Amino acid sequence: MTKFKAAVFDWAGTTVDFGSFAPMGVFVKAFETFGITATIAEARGPMGSAKWDHIRAMMDMPEIAAQWQEKYGAAPTDGDVDKVYEIFVPMNEEVVADFATLVPGCKDAIDTLRAKGLKIGSTTGYTRSIMERVLPVAAEQGYAPDNLICADDLPEGRPGPLGMYQCMVDLVAYPPAAIIKVDDTEPGIKEGVAAGCVTVGVALSGNAVGKTPQELAALSADEIAALRESASAILREAGAHYVIDTVADLPALIETLETAE
């Protein structure tokens, strides 16, 4: 019997979409629609947040804010965020299924946790409409978590704890210390920390590294180690109790945590 009752996973960069690519180009294209140039690096910065909050954070970046001020004669407002968001969501809906391949080893890891009796929950910065495109593709590959909390399901999203609280209700799993939150982004880790859960960051499959498995395989061991350390530092700064390379490494970590008691 494991001391853990549930594991709650993020989606892009954690269980699907190795490297977290689906939203990147869409953010850039959405801003282009308004005559604003945004970079992939700027788009990756707030990753893990609800997408409205993500766009707000991008608009607050000095380069983007300055472009907006010059083009429209005023600093970007929440109303302007609404306009970009309205363009972004349908764009993301159209491409997200193309980036819904499971992270290598994900299904085996989930199957192992289920065999140990853990419930499998999920939260995401995506909206429900976007996730409706992802769910069937993930299910075809054998991954169907017991619940899903989307960015627009609750009055407040990441980095607050409400999504995790709802997971506790949905999964009938408590106390928080018996729940593991697995994520590749700062807001997602902070979500778990805020709820009092054990937090596990995934470094190499996530947004901070932003590379495909093929791109990683082409790098030297030293280059991979540097990327791992950089991503791990970000996750630990956000409050991650543990950091692993990918979700495939989670069962081994859980075994270690159980035998350490």
Image (spheres, rainbow, N blue to C red):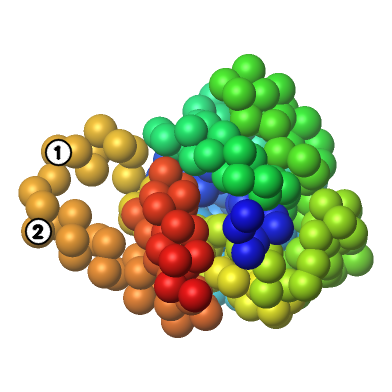
Judge whether residue 236 can be spotted in this image.
yes
- The residue labelled by disc 1 is 218
Residue that extends furthest to the front in the rendered view of this protein: 1
Q: Position of residue 233 (x, y in %)?
A: 35, 76
Q: Residue at x 70, y 58 (%)?
A: 5
Q: Residue at x 8, y 49 (%)?
A: 220
Nearer to me, 37 or 144: 144
**Crowding near pointer 2: few (<14 within 10 Å), some, many (20+)?**
few
Judge whether residue 90 can be spotted in this image.
no
Q: Position of residue 169 (x, y in %)?
A: 89, 59
Q: Residue at x 61, y 38 (%)?
A: 115
User: Picture quarter containing residue 211?
Assistant: top left
Residue 211 horizontal side relative to residue 34, left or right: left
Residue 130 horizontal side relative to residue 201, left or right: right
Q: Position of residue 71 (x, y in %)?
A: 61, 63
Q: Residue at x 80, y 37 (%)?
A: 129
Q: Vertically, is 5 above or below 233?
A: above
User: Picture quarter containing residue 207?
Assistant: bottom left
Q: Vertically, is 24 above or below 213?
A: below
**Crowding near pointer 1: few (<14 within 10 Å), some, many (20+)?**
few
Nearer to me, 24 or 225: 225
- Quadrant location, the N terminus: bottom right
Which disc is residue 222 wearing?
Answer: 2
Q: CA distance from mark 2 to mark 1?
A: 12 Å
Element under disc 1:
loop
Q: Position of residue 218 (x, y in %)?
A: 14, 38
The amino acid beneath tag 2 is Asp
Residues marked 2 and 1 touching at CB (< 8 Å): no
The amino acid beneath tag 1 is Ala
Element under disc 2:
helix
